[in-house]
Structures are given as structure tokens and as C-alpha cells.
Image: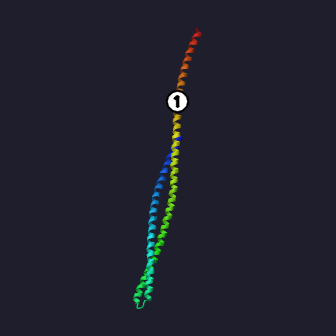
Amino acid sequence: QARARHVTAQLEEAIRRADKTEAQEAALYYQVEQLERLAASSHEKVQELSCQLEAANTAVNEAEVNFAAARAREGVTSAELAQLQTLLATEHANVVDLNFQVEEGEAAAAAVETQHLMCRSESVTLVLQVTDDQERVQDLTAHLERVRSLLAQAEEQEVATRAECAALYFEASEERENLRELSVQLQEALSS
């Protein structure tokens, strides 16, 4: 019985541990899914910014061509040149800003990707741990069943042995009674 109590305590502890690991694995799985969505969103944003950057570079090239053509043209006013130069400077500033945004977006996407890979790796480890915990619970359950079966057999054997002892005691009592009667008869025979 002490062994059965010990195995039961081990089984209860293994079940608690398995439940805890499963809860951790479920939470981490949810986190992995969130990071997957965030990584996809980050990559989409970088793609979008890259398209904007490409369009901005095209606009800069056009502004440079227009500015160069205007300078070469006769009769162009300084106000027109100043306007084209301002436009060119604006387009350049836009390219610089988009370049910075693309770099930031790529760094953020890379960080999310790294975090996602780490969580996925940890999730795989926890899945293996869950499997190990479940196997331990199954092993301990089977072990407990064997211990209980042996205990039941021992109890049955004890009951049978006690019944046998009682029968032998009863038989011995009868034999003593028979011996007592024979002794009395023998005494009577000798005295006569």
C-alpha cells in the first residue's frame, strides 16, 4: 500500500508537470503564430516602401533631367530654375527618407524573424517535452496498475491464508477434543 501511495504521488506530480508543459506549449504556439503574422506584415511593409523608393528614384532622375534641360534652354528665368531646383531637392529628400524607412523596416523584419525562429525552436523543444511527460504519465499509470494488481493478489492471498489458518485451528481444536475424550476413555479403562 505504501508503494501504491508512492507511485500515485509520482503519477499526480507527472500529470501536473505534463499539464504545465502543455499550457506553456499552447501559449508559445499562439506567440509563434502572432510572430508569423507580424513577420509577414513587416515584409509587406518593406516591399511597399521599396516600391515607393523605386518610384522616388525615378522621380529624382526625371527632376534631374528636367533641371539639366532647363539650364541648357535659352530664355529660362532664374525663378523657373529655382522652382526646378527646389523640386529636385524635395525629391532627393524623399529618397533619403524612404531609404531610411526601408532600412528601418528591414531591421525590424529581421528582428521579428529572429524572434519567430527562436520561439519556433523553443516550441519544438516543448512539444518533445510534452511527449516525454505524456509517456511518463502513461508509464506511471501502467506501473500503478501493476502495483494495485499485486496488492489485490496479496490481499486475496492473505484472506485465503487466514481462512486456511482458521480451518486448521478448527481442525486442531476438534483433534484436541478427540484426544481429550480418548484420554478420558483410557483413564476409565485403566481404572476398571
**Residue shown at the point (47%, 51%) measured from the top left:** 19
Q: Position of residue 173 (x, y in %)?
A: 54, 21
Q: Position of residue 49 (x, y in %)?
A: 44, 72
**Residue shown at the point (47%, 75%) measured from the top left:** 99
Q: Position of residue 35 (x, y in %)?
A: 46, 62
Vertical side of 186 occupied by 15: above or below: below
Q: Circle 1: is it few (<14), some (14-19), or many (20+) Cα within 10 Å?
A: few
For residue 178, which quarter of the picture? top right
Q: Mark 1 is on which residue type?
A: Ala
Residue wearing tag 1: 160
In-image side of 77 versus 18 (left or right): left
Vertical side of 98 occupied by 23: above or below: above
Q: Which sits in the foreground, 22 or 49?
A: 49
Residue 61: tell me if it is visible.
yes
Its colouring scheme is rainbow
**Residue shown at the point (50%, 54%) measured from the top left:** 127
Vertical side of 46 occupied by 188: above or below: above
For residue 189, which quarter of the picture? top right
Q: Which sits in the foreground, 16 or 90?
A: 90
Q: Helix or strand or loop: what does disc 1 sit on?
A: helix
Q: Position of residue 90 (x, y in %)?
A: 43, 81
